[in-house]
Image (cartoon, grey):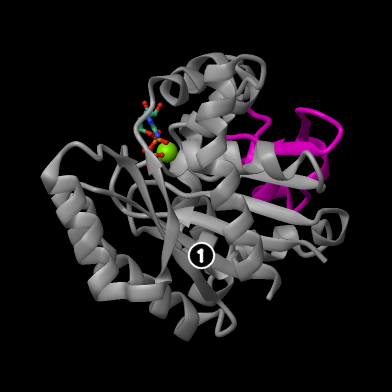
Amino acid sequence: MGTVISFGLQKGGVGKTTTTAITAYLLAKKYKVLAIDFDSQGNLTQMLTTDNIYNFTGKTVLEAIQEKNADPYIVEISKNLHLLPAEDLLALLPNRLIEMYPERKDQLASLRMLLEPIKNRYDYILLDLPPNVGDHTLCGLVASDYAVVVMQTEPFAFNALERYLETMELAQEMANPDLRLAGILTCLMNQRTSLDNAIHHQALEDYESLVFDTVIKRKARIKEFSLEGIRDRTKADREALEQYQSFVKELLSRVQA
Ligand SMILES: Nc1ncnc2c1ncn2[C@@H]1O[C@H](COP(=O)(O)OP(=O)(O)O)[C@@H](O)[C@H]1O
Ligand SMILES: [Mg+2]
């Protein structure tokens, strides 16, 4: 049965999509992985397919939810890595859910119900969540076994953490009591900046062992992956992936325990 892990925080630009994509890529070397783009910006779709997101119009996770069937919309990136894509119109999800289900509880369980029949085909299902705590994030958290909170060493991202943890509690109370926090991942760290270090240390002080030991540092090659797709050919590629390899190891030890 596939373990569902979401990557979220209601701030943009903190590294959620990059983390989801690279984690999916690395896990797929050994496991069957489904990545789900649950942000209408379609960045995960862009990063994993290196295709224009509008080529997926009418063939996304939104249609899958509306038809209650994911199968026709799963894109094979490789044998082990599959994707449920997204584009702008995923923003319409809350309206569509209101039309489909009178009960709030059912609206929020829509993604969870979509995954139920396909879960056993995958070892891991990774969800990339959008930068808000609206219905997309709630649906994502209700569908998740584990949540990873992605934090950038920026004051705004750090302040958002507490609210995100409250949103997790809301999802637990409303529909998913089994949801667990896998941990908080510090991304885009610039180790030469004292504020970055101060924020990472504050996170360690406040959240202790919930913070992953691995810290994802800012690296130009990682930014290039967003546009060109993830590569594993040159020394720079391997160095960029290395820090994520250590994150994946930690993540697996937490979700398999
Ligand atoms: N470790 C990193 N080093 C350098 N650039 C990064 C790194 N992680 C993410 N980025 C870049 O930062 C920007 C925001 O990252 P993204 O993953 O899209 O964040 P989010 O999904 O939280 O909005 C993107 O341009 C991405 O390429
Ligand atoms: Mg994103």
Q: Position of residue 223 (x, y in %)?
A: 42, 23
Q: Is residue 53 visible?
A: no
Q: Nearer the viewer, residue 188 or 160?
A: 188
Determine the residue positioned at 53% across, 28% down.
239
Chain part drawn in magenta = 58-86
Residue depicted at 73% across the width and 55% down the height = 124
> Which residue is at a point 29% across and 67% down the rendered structure image?
204
The quadrant where ligand 1 appears is: top left
Question: Badge 1, how many Cα within 10 Å: few under 14, some, many 20+?
Answer: many
Q: Quadrant of the N terminus?
A: bottom right
Along the horizontal axis of the image, is 147 left or right of 119?
left
Classify residue 113 by image quadrant: bottom right
Figure quadrant of residue 57:
top right
Q: Position of residue 164 (x, y in %)?
A: 33, 66
In the rendered image, residue 56, in percent from the top left (x then y), is placed at 63, 24
Residue 23, relative to residue 95: is it above or below? above
Kindly identify which residue carries mark 1: 147
Q: Quadrant of residue 167?
A: bottom left
Q: In the image, what residue type sits under mark 1?
A: Ala
